[in-house]
Image: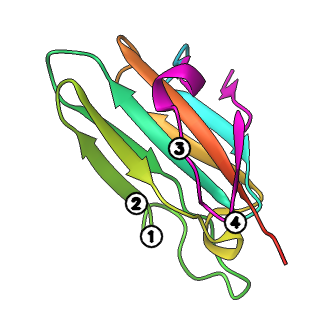
Amino acid sequence: MAQTITATEVLDRGIGVADIAAAAVAATDAEITFKNTGSEILFVVNADAGAREATLVAIPDFYGRGGGGDNDEVISVPADGIGMFPLMNVAMFGSTVTVNLDATANTSLALFRLRKVA
């Protein structure tokens, strides 16, 4: 069963300091899901000696285009490094996002939601 994570911090208009280490939760499953409003930023923290790969899974759009791996976004997170998936379009990635990890050992995730201020 997929591991579900929630946004741990809300940053006003992206102004402020995001404490990634404090917000990070250990990956316990290779499939991660979370609610997506289009205002989330996901950090993948790799504390391992080897690189990690994370895949943001795309869904078919309104016309059935994409999905099936065609529009997935893949990042390689270096050893002792941090990778980031920026704001994720709901039309492309859905209101529930899936991220697949190639390994979970020494891997954690921090999800931030940016608050829209008028």
Q: Are marks 1 and 4 in contact (CB under 8 Å)?
A: no
Say which label, 3 or 2, has the lower sequence index.
3
Q: Is residue 94 magenta?
A: no
Say which label, 4 or 2, has the lower sequence index.
4
Q: Quadrant of residue 72?
A: bottom left
Three-letter amino acid code of the residue under disc 2: Glu
Is label 4 or label 2 in front? 4
Q: Residue 38: image x %, image y %?
A: 69, 66
User: Circle 1 is placed at which residue position?
Assistant: 71
Residue shown at 55%/63% (left/top)? 58
In front: 18, or 35? 18
Three-letter amino acid code of the residue under disc 1: Asn
In front: 24, or 69? 24
Which quarter shows the C terminus?
bottom right
Is label 3 or label 4 in front? 3
Q: CA distance from mark 3 to mark 1?
A: 31 Å
Q: Would residue 4 appear left or right of 98 to someone viewing this image?
A: right
User: Circle 2 is placed at which residue position?
Assistant: 73
Q: Residue 29: image x %, image y %?
A: 55, 19
